[in-house]
Image: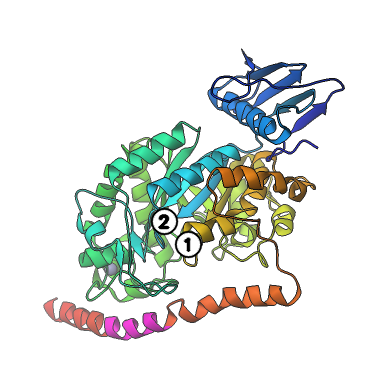
Amino acid sequence: MFPIIPKPRNIELKDGEGRLTRDDSGGANYEYVYDPDIPYEGYSLKTEGTHTVLRASSEAGAFYGETTLNVLDDMTGGAPGAFFVSDSPAYGYRAYMLDVARYFFDTDVVMKHIDYMALLKLNVLHLHLTDDQGWRVEIKKYPRLTEVGSHRRRTHIRFKAHCGYYTQEELKKIVAYAHARHIKVVPEIDFPGHFQAAIAAYPELGCCGEGLRVAENFGVKFDVACIGNPVVIEFMKDVLSELIPIFTDEYFHIGGDEVPFRRWEKCPKCLALKKSLGADSWHRVQAHVVNELADFLAEHGKTTITWNESEPTGVQNKNIVWQYWQGGLSEEKLAHEINEGRRVIMSPGEPFYLDLPYSINNVARMRAYKLVPDGVTAAENIIGVEFPLWTELVPDEKQADKMLFPRLMAGAEIAWRGSADTDIEERFGRYLAVLKRMGAKISEFKKEPRGFMKILDRIWWFRRQLYWGAVPNLIRNIKVDKILKKRNGQLKSDD
Ligand code: ACM
Ligand code: ZN
């Protein structure tokens, strides 16, 4: 068996001997040959006797060839036998997302996750940097974002205060570390929803920011950015302007998911914007501001990504890449959008979210998922695949590693090959020692629970609804309704 994950696309095992020798730094020796016929990120390896040749046309391809060789060397004690491998990825965008907003993971942990990604040939790290429960990135023009927005008074797991953020210098370090491993970094500033930490820091960013704290519980919050206030768009442009020189790769993510329109419906500024645009729905108003930010990013050479439900078909700028997570969008509508030219990253919550319990998102379900929805005729617009780890219920590295492994390995194979091979689970075992040596906090791989344990696992997951924030949302709503009603009244009498 060739134990590598992701499994190379073509493997020929040959008769005869194949042994690897090592250089002074412990890496396997090979002869490098530049070969322009090999696809970008692809490579070939040929080992016969004690001679190995690695061919590639790009530095990334050479890096992946070397990774395959070194893992093979490690797992076979330097005697993999004679073989020929030729390999290249099915998708150019092979991503993993870490939500550092709900719980903060420091620079060292992020770099460790980058190491895991490199081992598995994933090439995009999506950092979910801001949310209702925390703003995790230093913005020099708005110091309160981290002074206030990075502190949560208590969490629902340990009932303790939680805080943390990355300085811009730390983010530069993360980006450089990722680049050295051929990994791009996509920052996400979630907007206009999941924005409560920013409003807590600067109340004028909300339709009614009075008395709002960084969220302590989870779920979808009603207090979103006041898109009718020009100050908010300027704020977003200022934030993006500070991040553009740090995140030097092509893509920027500006969220767009789970935006309730409740505040906008009662906010004079938002109502005025809707009227001035002649918009027949709040979706259109949201599309207008998202398009403005996407145009701003495009002027700086960036491509914008948003979660899929941020706009309905036909309204949003076609250059914006959608990250499909579901968000109320049927696969039929998704297929239509893809065929119309929308580029899409596939990260369906079920089965690709790595925070869901193993009883729901297991390897078998991940393997069975069809990456190209029925009805898609322009599959080339599916640029890649992503596996997000949301951290509402993942307070530390240990829990993160439990949720990641073994599923991230299956994910990496899906991203690389377009599907995970039938023997993927048999190949997990040998990676345990490798991951542990890299510092993973696991003693064994998590298994899918069976029987009664499966039911318990699901109950454990659904219990989160109990503290997902519905009641605090409703209580605050009564207060905000009163304030906004008073303001609307004042507005009418001022007219
Ligand atoms: C999401 O899961 N709200 C993108
Ligand atoms: Zn507003």
Residue 206, image x, y percentages = 27, 67
Q: Is residue 235 above or below residue 222?
A: above
- Which residue is at a point 33% across and 37% down the rendered structure image? 299
> Residue 372 vs residue 271: left or right?
right
Residue tagged by mark 1?
A: 391
Residue 87, image x, y percentages = 69, 29
Residue 416, image x, y percentages = 65, 39
Q: Nearer the viewer, residue 392 or 68?
A: 68
Q: Are marks 2 and 1 in contact (CB under 8 Å)?
A: yes
Q: Amino acid at mark 2?
A: Val
Q: Is residue 318 visible?
A: no
> Residue 441 vs residue 253: left or right?
right
Residue tagged by mark 2?
A: 100
> Residue 93 vs residue 197: left or right?
right
Q: Which residues are drawn in magenta?
A: 471-481
- Neighbour tally class for label 1: few under 14, some 14-19, many 20 plus, Cα within 10 Å: many
Q: Earlier in the sequence, mark 2 or mark 1?
A: 2
